[in-house]
Image (tube, helix red, strand yellow):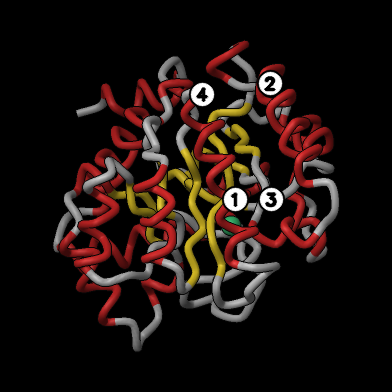
Amino acid sequence: MIIDSHFHTLEMKKKGLSPRQVFLEDTSENDFWGGLDIGIRLEDFEERRNLLEEFPHIRLSLGLYPSEVELPNLDEKLKVLEKTLRMWSWSQKMGPVVALGECGLDLHWQYGTLKDQQVLFQNQIALSNKYNLPLIVHNRNATAEVLGCFMNNPPTAGGIMHCFSGSPKDAQLFLDYGFYLSFAGNLTFKNNNDLRTTLRYVPRDRLLFETDSPYLSPVPFRGKINRPGYVRYVYQEASKVLGIDTDVLKRVIVINFLRLFPAFGEDEKLRSFLARE
Ligand SMILES: [Zn+2]
């Protein structure tokens, strides 16, 4: 079973894919199991929730992406976020929301001011702690600043550094906070030896893989619209880089995913996969 720890269903839809069709195809064609549909705003939560009701192997994260700082009424939004978490989170009501994010800092696009971004991020770290939901962290050119927020307000529910692309030294700093590092399609890019070096450094029990669909397609689909089933190319590359069998790696990742998201612990498909010799 292969898991995609990070995709955006409704962004796939905006690119012209039918998410329902994609999930039906991907789950039947290969050993793709499911994963996390990641939120970036609050307004589309209802649609995501309805769409995914029929796919029990897909759960949701909910949060405010750094670009949301440019919109008015952030305090109101944070209140709505909290209210929605109280109603729909796994930790509160066994709901479909199992993580908080995607949130973090983006100094590449410089949404709002750094201060605005930090305030929005810190508020979400606090909610992650309060509702015991792992954080899905977006970090673009902001490693020191993200760590600064962690230092002010240490995350206690752990989480994922998504699309990790830092050095082994950066990796260690996030590992020290108990985070998992999720590698995406850029691991397959020919010129990305640095990232492959980082992958070798990360302890296997802290690894996850993702597509970030519809963005960042792996080789051989680079430049095309990405879809969750393509996470298998990230697994293939990682097993080559690490020199371990893909089947062994799949098992490692399932175990990691279940450790971070106990909400999936009852899943029959995953249980029988792990029970196999
Ligand atoms: Zn994302």
Task: Say which element carries label 2.
Answer: helix
Contact (CB < 8 A) between labels 4 and 1?
Answer: no
Q: Earlier in the sequence, mark 4 or mark 1?
A: 1
Task: Say which element carries label 1.
Answer: helix
What residue did someone put label 4 on? 130
Q: Is residue 105 left or right of residue 159?
A: right
What residue did someone put label 3 on? 40
Residue 24 visible to an observer of this rendering: yes
Q: Amino acid at mark 3?
A: Ile
Q: Report the Cα–Cα distance between label 1 and label 3.
A: 16 Å
Outermost residue to the top: 93
Residue 88, label in figure: 2
- Within 10 Å of the Cα at label 4, are there few (<14), some (14-19), or many (20+) other Cα atoms? few
**Quadrant position of residue 226:** bottom right
In the image, is the residue at mark 4 within 8 Å of ligand 1 by its beta carbon?
A: no
Q: Report the Cα–Cα distance between label 3 and label 4.
A: 20 Å
Q: Amino acid at mark 2?
A: Trp
Q: Earlier in the sequence, mark 3 or mark 4?
A: 3
| Screen quadrant of the C terminus | top left
